[in-house]
Image: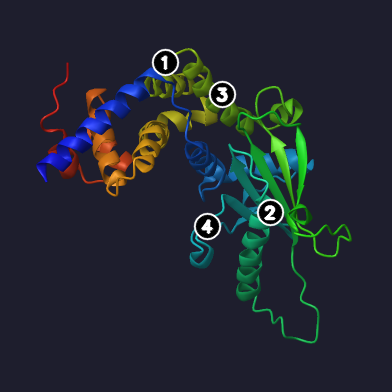
Amino acid sequence: MNDSIGSADSQFSEIAHQTQKTTPAPHPQYRDRLFKAIFGRDTEQSKKWRLELYNALNGSHYTDPDALKLNTIENVIYITMKNDVSFLIDSQMNLYEQQSTYNPNMPLRGLMYFSQLYQMFISQNEKDVHSSKIVKIPNPKFIVFYNGTQNFPDRLKLRLSDAFEKEDRSGDFEWTAEMININPGHNETLQKICQPLYNYTSYVSRISDNKKKGLTAKEAVDEAVDWAIKENLFDGFFKLQKEEILAMSLTEYDEESIHRAWYNDGLEDGIEQNKIENARKFFENGVSIGLIAKSLDMSEEKIQEIVKDVVIV
């Protein structure tokens, strides 16, 4: 048992050493979580930002944030997926997804999401699909906000028919996803119109730029959060939610490269060991016990036990 632990510690030391030499790429999930935190919550602020984003995309002028009825799927067991932000407005079913990696399967995923959204709609409105009368449903609108590293045009239409094993251009069975590039230098008019989207993009870009300058993951995130607070992005949201934003950003940054290394080495206990080592790394970098516990979804007592022998130089 002790030999096994010693071997694992030795392997992690080598992994950590290699990680320090390279600049780990940001895990795409932190951008997704932040996008949902900004545009996908049932708070007055989030409602306001969601309305601004919708108006900017559609050239509309709605003024009542409650006109957008949030219906985001939080847990779909049989397909084990959640969507980012979905809502109803004026007979339109909208689905907004954030992606930092290009995914040509978004039309198929959208089809699966919308089937659940329509099922919820039919059930809530007590409609009967077995009726002899046609059941009217809201028009679908599927938008994918892309901010990855690949170079794509401002807008790109993804089609379900591209995935058919045999080519079929009849249009009889089609589903689309419109991918909108929100990286700096793309869709600038849209971002100028929609301040919340511009703020989100600016924060994400700030972290990426910091990493390119050679800052560590923690330094890159800390500087970006402090900058966002100074610039009063989202009307003080970053100041009020600083710990939560640090948690979602730091965890995803540091976890990816080490977790991948454990996985590739075939260690069955890699996930748990990864959490333990992340806890030690965070503590060594001055992160509080409470924030570490929140970031790694562990109890403060467990974190205290893990870091009790850590020597801070």
Nearest the camera: 59 or 294? 294
Left or right, 50 with respect to 44, comes to right
Image vertical order of residue 274 relative to residue 75, above or below:
above
- Residue 205 badge: 3
The answer to whether marks 1 and 4 mark residues whose Cβ atoms lie closer than 8 Å is no
Q: Earlier in the sequence, mark 3 or mark 4?
A: 4
Q: Earlier in the sequence, mark 3 or mark 2?
A: 2
Given the image, on which type of amino acid does mark 3 rest? Answer: Ser
Left or right, 255 with respect to 101, comes to left
Given the image, on which type of amino acid does mark 1 rest? Answer: Leu
The answer to whether marks 2 and 1 mark residues whose Cβ atoms lie closer than 8 Å is no
User: Could you say where residue 55 lies in the image, as x and y percent from the top left?
Assistant: 73, 42
Report helix, strand or loop for mark 4: loop
Report helix, strand or loop for mark 1: loop
Q: CA distance from mark 2 to mark 1?
A: 38 Å
Residue at horizontal 73%, vertical 55%?
A: 163
Q: Residues within 10 Å of mark 4 (few under 14, many from 20)?
A: some
- Per the image, the residue denoted by label 2 is 94
- Residue 215 badge: 1
Quadrant of the rendered image containing residue 157: top right
Nearest the camera: 168 or 240? 168
- Per the image, the residue denoted by label 4 is 81
Quadrant (top left, top right, bottom left, bottom right) of the C terminus: top left
Q: Earlier in the sequence, mark 2 or mark 4?
A: 4
